[in-house]
Structure formats: C-alpha cells, structure tokens
Amino acid sequence: LMDVKVFDQELDALEIQTVQKETIHPRKSYKMNSSCADILLFAQYKWHVSRPSLLADSKDVMDNTTTQKYWLDIQLRWGDYDSHDVERYARAKFLDYTTDNMSIYPSPTGVLI
C-alpha cells in the first residue's frame, strides 16, 4: 500500500486537516470494471475544484464548486503507455467509475492517477 507521509509533511501548505488511508480490496488491481479510493484528504477549510478535465487542459471550468473531501485512486496497470494516451484512458476510467454503482468513492471530488 501507499505511504502517505508526503501529505503529512505538507498539511499546512495544502490546507489538509486529515489524511486517511482507505482499506483497499485485495484484488483491486485485477478488477477492471470498478474501483475505489486509496487515500482520502479532508480540508481545513474548503478547496475550489474544477469539473473533470485532462491533466494538461488549460481550459478547466471553475464554477465556484468547493469540497472538503478529496480522494485519490491510484491505478496500477500494465501495458505500453508510450504508444497509448494514458491521460485519456485515466479520464475515461474516472468518468466510468464515478458514474457506476460498483465503485466506492467517499465524495464526488477526486483524482484517478
């Protein structure tokens, strides 16, 4: 499992109140049709968030949406990502997982890496 010390070291800078490591299903890496959060961050205040977008998208839509919970889902996948668009793959999986009934996310805001 992931080590969350990097978040613990940046609590004040990132305005994080609590970092929580989620319990992960032991076969998460083998399930391709659903997922779950690995890490959950709780804000000291409220974070401004955008709509789902690609990492390098310069046209993020910020519509004054805020959250106090933000999850991270770390995906471990095999393949030749030099010849595939991993950014679009991650966005497609994010949209699939956040709209299905099988994936487990503790809030509507997060990131799939």
Image (cartoon, rainbow, N blue to C red):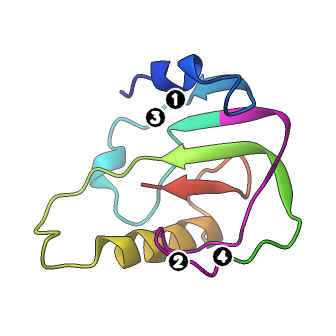
Seen at 67% across and 34% down, the residue is 41
Look at mark 4 in the image and give the residue it sits on: 60
Residue type, numbered disc 1: Thr
Residue type, numbered disc 4: Asp
> Secondary structure beneath disc 1?
loop
> Secondary structure beneath disc 3?
loop
Residue type, numbered disc 3: Ile
Q: Is residue 5 above or below residue 49?
A: above
Query: Mark 2 or mark 1, which is nearer the start of the sequence?
Result: 1
Quadrant where the N terminus is found in the figure: top left
Give the spatial CA distance, label 2 vs label 3. Answer: 30 Å
Q: Which stretch did the figure color magenta?
A: 41-59
> Secondary structure beneath disc 2?
loop
Between 46 and 95, the one nearer to me in the picture: 46
> Secondary structure beneath disc 4?
loop
Label number found at residue 24: 3
Residue type, numbered disc 2: Asp
Give the spatial CA distance, label 4 vs label 1. Answer: 31 Å
Asked whether the residues under the numbered discs 3 and 1 touch, taking CB atoms below 8 Å apart as contact, a structural biologist would say yes
Look at mark 2 in the image and give the residue it sits on: 57
Asked whether the residues under the numbered discs 2 and 3 touch, taking CB atoms below 8 Å apart as contact, a structural biologist would say no
Seen at 61% across and 66% down, the residue is 98
Seen at 57% across and 18% down, the residue is 8
**Image quadrant assignment for residue 53:** bottom right
